[in-house]
Amino acid sequence: MKIFARRSRWAALGAAAAALLLLQSPATPAAAADYYAAAQGKTGADLKSALHGIIKNQSKISYSAVWEALKVTDQDPNNSSNVILVYSGRSQSKSTNGGGVNDWNREHVWAQSHGDFGTSTGPGTDLHHIRPEDVTVNSTRGNKDFDLGGSPVSEAAGSYTDSNSFEPRNAVKGDVARMILYMAVRYDGGDGFADLEVNDSSGNGSVPWHGRISVLKQWNEMDPPDAFEQRRNQIIFDTYQHNRNPFIDHPEWVEAIW
């Protein structure tokens, strides 16, 4: 009954959220208009290909450098000494990064084993899908696909998990969707890594796929990009990788491709 109740709640919100997305102008900085020039007017596979051609041009950082970058990209806007943990929503001291039980570490939202890229420079260090998270919660999420349902996650109120899926709290459902879809566009097998793709499975294991696309599309509509996510995208572009997550700037492109 709990799973059904959450599904019903999201279904009820879906139409209104989708309408809101259509009314809103994309939260795209003026300088980004030229950045996406090659993608304008395209849909489907053509749009996906054009976006890949744009965002594949990026600077790369080491896995050790990710620690310091996250302290900037995920800084708590109300406390410059802290970062916000993505699933937990907790504001935690930047200095408590590490491997201890109550530390925060580097969560790969596109699970590393889905394509076996580990911590390789490239997908394994791409800030557009790496976020700070409590060590225990990170372990609980593991390499599970994203879906609705399961039991409450300790230390991550509003998140749920079962044997093969993880449902993040409502406030970051859209963030998760847009990070996953960024990865599916950025990494297409052409630069020495697996071709990452989304599908509608919640049991992908170690294959280079991530799900579930039907749920991720709903989350993108129900939780549009907020100021924190937009600021994060801009910092990654300006300071670190010099590429953008197009689905933060243009969330309507999710439906246009998938």
Image (spheres, grey):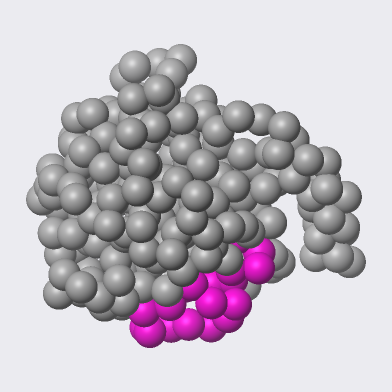
The magenta span reads 198-216
Q: Is residue 242 left or right of residue 254?
A: left
Q: Is residue 53 above or below residue 222?
A: below
* Quadrant assignment, res 23: top right
Task: Name which residue lies at 31% across and 76% down.
Answer: 195
Residue 209 forms part of the magenta stretch: yes
38 within the magenta span:
no
Q: Closest to the observer: 37 or 65?
A: 37
Q: Quadrant of the N terminus?
A: bottom right
Residue 17 visible in the displayed image: no
At x 53% / y 83%, what residue is drawn? 203
Q: Position of residue 101 (x, y in %)?
A: 36, 51
One can see residue 32 in this view: yes
Q: How many marks?
A: 0
Left or right: 119, with 94 as reference point:
left
Q: Residue at x 65, y 68 (%)?
A: 214
Instruction: Give the dominant element type of the magenta stretch: helix, strand or loop.
Output: loop
Front one among 169 and 54? 54
Residue 103 x %, y %: 33, 43
Horizontal placement of 173 versus 233: left or right?
Answer: right
Q: Quadrant of residue 46?
A: bottom left
Furthest residue toward front: 41
Front residue of this view, candidates 62 and 31: 31
- Identify the image quadrant of the C terminus: bottom right
The residue at 27%/57% (across/down) is: 53
x and y, in percent, of residue 160 in the image: 64, 60
Q: Please provide percent x and percent y for residue 127.
A: 28, 46
Q: Pick whichever, 91 or 172, lies toward us.
A: 172
